Amino acid sequence: MDFEEVAPDNLTPDNVTPDEDTERLRGRPRDPAIGDSALAAARELLAEVGWDKTTMVAISERAGVGKPALYRRWPSKTHLVFEAVFGWVDESPPVADATDPEEWVRASCNYTLELFAKPEVKAALPGLLSAFAERGDLPSTLWSEFGGPGIAMLAQMLNRGGGDADAMRDAQATMLFIVGGTMVLRMLMPETDSAPLVERMPDILLHGVTPKEQKDT
């Protein structure tokens, strides 16, 4: 039976005493190495054994970190896995070098296609999508942190002349098509079958679906 692993009652923030809270904030700052080890362990386990077997116990054992340390950082397995696969910080956004909307679309398609092809991401997606229904904070976080900077950049490009009230909505819709399309493609289609679609996705987003002109016979 699949169930959500959440922090025991005695490890939730509501049960931290003022003295313990002060100690954590002043005298005993969290060791970032513990968090890094846990996130790396989660990614390794997802790729090796899948979502169901990537438990808090398994992550704890792989990382060499006690379960209480995990639950002080993440309230559930879902939150930990979410951060493990989506919570990185790149040195620069993947579309930072784009100079126009076409370059932005192509760079965004390439980036998301590579992201959702990673074994740990593919293994995590079904479980995360199921958990999203019960944890409304995670989808909004994914949308704002994963898509937000790129959306703002595209909207600025689309509105360079000023006066385009639809620039932000067009940018959001474009990102939605890219993220949704690449996610579904990687989850449902074998790589050999998806290759021709991967090649066509940016062109369809940029130019729409139009019939090819018939060649003169």
Image: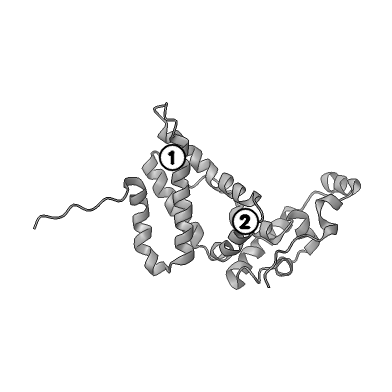
Specify how the rendered protein is coloured: one colour
Circle 2: residue type? Phe
**Quarter of the image where one finds residue 193:** bottom left
The CA distance from mark 2 to mark 1 is 25 Å
Residue 201 at x, y percent in the picture: 37, 54
Circle 1: residue type? Asp
Q: In this view, does 4 lie above or below 156?
A: below
Judge left or right: residue 128 versus residue 104: right
Q: Mark 1 points at which residue?
A: 170
Residue placed most toward the observer, 18 or 131: 131
Q: Which residue is drawn at 44% across and 55% down?
A: 181
Q: Mark 2 points at which residue?
A: 132
Dot 2 or dot 1: first in sequence order is 2
Circle 1 packing at 10 Å, graded few (<14), some (14-19), many (20+), is: some
Residue 114 at x, y percent in the picture: 47, 58
Residue placed most toward the observer, 161 or 209: 209
